[in-house]
Image: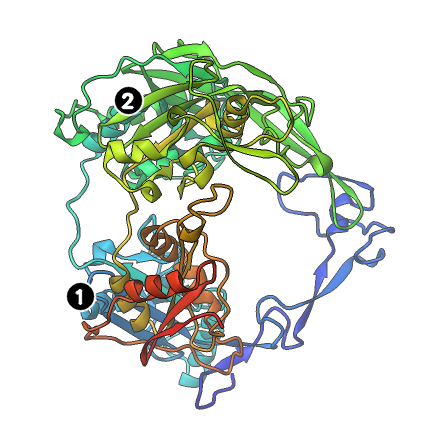
Amino acid sequence: MKSDDAVPTVACVRCAGTTFTLDRCRCRDGDGDFLVEQQVGGPDDDGRPWPDCELCAGDGTVARPCLECSGHGRCRSQLVLTVANLDTGAVASASVVPGSVEPTLGPDGWRIALGPLLAELAGRAGVAPATLREVFTLDRPPEPDGQLSVLLNRRWRPDLVAVDRHDLEARALANRSYAPWLVFLGRTAAPDRPDLAGHLDRLRRLADRLCLDLVVEARSTGYGTPSWDIRFETFGAGVPQRPHGVHSDLPTAVERTSVDDACYGLAERCLTAPAHYLDPQLPDSHPLPGEPVEPVDVDQLERRILRDCADAPGAQAIWRDGRWRHTSLYTADTTTTLAELETGQVARQHTVILARTWEPPAPSWLGDPIPQTPCGDCHGTGTREWLLPCHACAGNGRTCQGAVLTVTDLAGRVVHLNWRADDSAAPAMLVGTEPAGQPVVQLADRYRLRPWATIFGVRPDELVDLDSDRAVDHDLLDGIVTVVRPGDDPAVSHLTTVSRGRPGGRLLVSTAGWDAPPLTRLARVVHGLGLVLRVVVTDHRHNAGDLRLVQGLHWQVDAVGTQSPPDGAGTPWHRSLPEAVAYCLRYLGSDLHRSLPTVPDHPIGVPQQPIPPDDLPDPTGRVRELAARHPGQPVTARLDRTGWQVRVPE
């Protein structure tokens, strides 16, 4: 081990300090054949190379820059733990280097346990330990045997001399070079422990109002314990190839599945579901929290699903029409996919298709089928060149001439509107012409989303697509359609575009807004982490008279390193500041990783902010004013150690 005044480093274990590795070429997966069969287990290391391989030319090995050390030949033996308080902005950190933390004996041997150190940092930052979440895994608490543990080599013993102990510790810390800075966010006070029965009851009653199925699924993993998933689905959706949530048991799945989690990926897993209009019989629209909670026995539901899953690859409980419908899963088919590899070979991949052994009856709220035709671009196949999804139909092979709009505040108030190409609607109004001559028209109010923002008492930029979790675009807000071919019905063209890639032809919109802290609170946290908070806004309000163009204010908020260029921001695309702040928190881990020093001899900073600044001004008013003076051009505000710096376009 080499040590200097900066930070200890060790020779990279993977490349032995040579800065490159000789890796096994992928062509050996085929054992010398052109056709490569996908292996159920790991690749065969003894496989013969393919003589005509385009990567190794038949040698069987490929030289690549070492990914472990990024081509430096050495790895940093430092791990930094940081706790940041989202409420106050307090930050506490500790640097873990060889000899700084006394190893403890665990079931798998000696290890550097980081849990006690994390609890100490949480106390210094005023964070409730139960609220700690690592920035890359904000949806679940840290794992004591994963993120919070560094396993040492079995040769480590407490009776070794200090030099040998520290050398083994340095190598173990260097093996964590893929995540050398662990940042945990938390709150000052922990919320009350969730009522699992009440939360599951709220999900199923919300499913009733949204006219969706609530699916609770256990799927075999091949290792004895099944994985659990809770999600919303549209009627007629098949069993997805893989669940989007993987939890160890049903209580954990209930606790960690929010409404947003249940909606995530709805379009992808329900892409081929049949499209129907709705005929719902909705209850009174009073808020869900005010309704009496019907008893849900989570333990009994779990036991029933496990019983159905005993001799099957999985089982489901589907909440539909006010009751649970239970069914097991079976292997219905196996599909084969051919794909070209970078070696020049062709890989044959086999995928197991699961299906339900019993399909529940159709729901009472199901209406007439939405008219649809095979996609004219892909001829109903759903794919185009290189087996990419067809853009015209988003991969489902059909285009719908209708759609269903659902607007909800996720608290009980729900509106369903069947969008049909109705001749009784007001005629489309010409609002412009594209440079190529295509007319741009605006449809009647019934095809616009902007009026629903007024009805629900929110701003238009607070209308959020529940599937993509992004603000709805300008064309949907104002019913703007570009008529591509002469003679096309604008309403039909609009409905075809709206329903493209939607689950069952449905557009689900939330008015609940964004779960994001104020910008000044985020600024205190980023300031305490020793980074620069960058806020970019572009003003397009001067386009208000031309509905063909981008409208309103667009924002971007991100954290960057102190050495980042002042004008390196991209084009802002968030429709509101709260949306930009929410996305900044969601991807804060990636921003922190990009800010790390690339040279292993340079240490990672150990930020401390016991007393957060309470005088950080809010720059939004100033940047809005400057953006209005420079329409269409990005105005940037950067918060560094000297305060806010505003940059205007030259």
Using the image, determine if residue 525 lies above or below residue 357.
below
Residue identifier under label 2: 209
SS state under label 1: loop
Query: Depth-wise, is mark 1 or mark 2 nearer the camera?
Result: 2
Q: Position of residue 221 (x, y in %)?
A: 47, 35
Q: Position of residue 387 (x, y in %)?
A: 69, 35
SS state under label 2: helix
Instruction: From the viewer's side, name the closer residue of 305 and 500.
Output: 500
Residue identifier under label 1: 126
* Number of marks present in the image shown: 2
Q: Is residue 85 visible?
A: no
Horizontal side of 240 relative to 613 (left or right) equals right
Could you tell me the amino acid type at mark 1?
A: Gly
Using the image, determine if residue 479 lies above or below residue 634.
above
* Mark 1 residue crowding within 10 angstroms, few (<14) / some (14–19) / many (20+): many
Q: Position of residue 13 (x, y in %)?
A: 58, 71
Residue 576 disc label: none
Q: Position of residue 47 (x, y in %)?
A: 76, 49
Q: Is residue 282 visible?
A: yes
Could you tell me the amino acid type at mark 2?
A: Arg
Using the image, determine if residue 239 lies above or below residue 159.
above
Horizontal side of 70 relative to 3 (left or right) equals right
Mark positioned earlier in the residue sequence (1 or 2):
1
Q: Mark 2 and mark 1 in contact (Cβ < 8 Å)?
A: no
Instruction: From the viewer's side, name the closer residue of 259 and 509.
Output: 509
